Image (cartoon, rainbow, N blue to C red):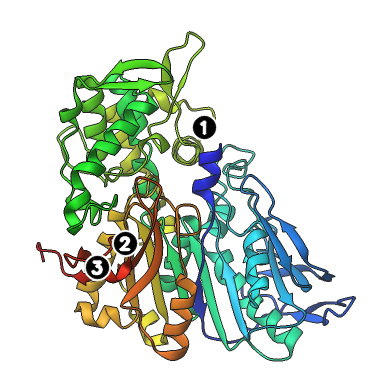
Amino acid sequence: MRRLLTVLAAGVPLAAAVYLPTASAEPRTSASAPHGCTTTSVKAPSGTRVESVTAVRQEGGTVHGSGVLGGTVTGVPAYCEVTVTLTHPGDGDHARIRTWLPVTGWNGRLQALGGAAFSAGDNGAGLAAAVKNGYAATTTDAGVGDALDVGWALNGQGQVNTALLKNFASRSQHEAALVGKEVVDAVYGRPASYSYFTGCSTGGRQGYMEAQRYPDDYDGILADAPAVNWNRYELATLWPQVVMNNEKTYVAGCKLEAFTAAAVNACDTLDGARDGLVDDASRCDFDPRGLIGTKVLCEGEELTVTAADATVVRKIWDGPRTASGRKLWSGVPVGADLKGLAGTAPDADGDLKGAPFPVPAHWTASWVKKDPSFDVSTITYGQFTELFQQAVAEYGDLMDTDDPDLSAFRTSGGKLLTWHGQADQYIPPQGTVDYHRRVVRETGSAKKVDDFYRLFLAPNTDHCGLDGKDGSADGLAALTAWVEHGKAPRTLPATLVNADGKQLDRNLCAYPEVSRYRGHGDPSLATSFRCVLPSRH
């Protein structure tokens, strides 16, 4: 569970132009805000009805995040908490939008926060951090549950709850942008000067959705490790379990770690320096068969790497394919923690069996098979291809956020910034790279894309890892400088953690450039590296 909590933590930023919601026949619902909270008046976004509005002054202090993600933020100043509950008439849903507004020290900006896994919004920790940094902050729960709560997937008739899935996919995020900005205007007596959206993983997907479908919602979007191509990526992340079950080979975690360590060691010098980082992991061609016969110490027991182990790892790195060999999606990147998706656990007899990561397992069972009790360990290679194609056909238009046409967002003046870990064990970064390439083709040139959309790849960084789990980068600061002062980030300063656990300073390069050692200087310092185009370009 610790690794699960590490992966699901939501990320950081997105932006919007300030404007009032679409006019609605619904009356404004007001609530007196005690203890200094200003009375709010909220107009229902088009297609919704306001069920309630409450406003309560909170004294701040220490805020604990709810649900499985948890998290604690200290030193939070007093804030006004305005909660607006919306419903879509006829759908029976109840989507709660929370907006926290610092009583003093507001920086004039609104920050909206995305969700993680199957939660649509923030659990309170991100809101508290935003308020602590001077932002008014808003988020929506879309009427669904916590990060691993999928009880809302099906209705009483065993059919997909399309209303809640629409909320989760897109419409509740847009409505939160409208309501959040209106609440800010009502409480402070003026609109936010700038509006941003921040998110990682599911939150990253929501950021790309906003840029594609609601290009006027935010001035700036920070969408990290984004789950674009939701349906392809979700099924693809079940592939490691499908491989182990079909090959009838369950690789112990210590062996998986040995494969990863060997790959990192073999490809470490791709950037010109032996620094414990694999830069541009897609170029690492380490062959796992090189470890066959190697002895690995696992909890005091010596195990031997077998040819079957190497076959499983090779298939996982390669990614899902059809029986005829057609590639369906990217695999786990070389250098990433294979235990995330190729997890195992002993059964009653002490034999290893697959332990699938809950997110793709839940998506496959509850939404694709529409049977929460479905056993994903029974999926054959052939059935996997069928499920993959079914998911794309059934949910592609609703859930995917891979439309490369960002012309409306570009015209609105919006800026989109993304970082993605090259060792992301849950969402392959190649999906994000492929999307960026498609945007370049759609827009006409890389230079035009650089004017509004920049991607940064972080070596040796796992899922949402620069949010403080195995490194750090202030993407929001870079985004606000870009939006408010026109300073486009050619690099993104970051602290990375190498294979030995040592912290290194790096300037992440704007894709497609990569970092290269200058040939002299301390490899732990960013100044010892420069950004260049890789040789294949």
Residue 73 appears left or right of 235: right
Instruction: Spot the residue most to the top.
Output: 349
Can you tell which mark lies on residue 371?
1
Classify mark 3: residues with Cα within 10 Å, few (<14), some (14-19) or many (20+): many
Foreground mark, 2 or 3, reads 3
Q: Is residue 510 visible?
A: no
Residue type at tag 1: Asp
Residue 326 appears left or right of 344: left
Classify mark 2: residues with Cα within 10 Å, few (<14), some (14-19) or many (20+): many
Foreground mark, 3 or 1, reads 3
Residue 289 appears left or right of 144: left
State the quadrant of the C terminus. Answer: bottom left
Q: Which residue is mark 2?
A: 457
Reply above or below: 122 against 445: above
Q: Mark 3 to mark 1: distance in Å?
A: 52 Å
Q: Which residue is mark 3?
A: 529
Residue type at tag 3: Phe
Classify mark 1: residues with Cα within 10 Å, few (<14), some (14-19) or many (20+): some
Q: Mark 1 to mark 2: distance in Å?
A: 37 Å
- The numbered mark, 3 or 1, whose residue comes first in the sequence reads 1
Q: Viewer-proximal residue, 122 or 460?
A: 460
* Residue displayed at 62% across by 59% down: 122
Residue 82 appears left or right of 384: right
Tell me the SS state at disc 2. Answer: strand
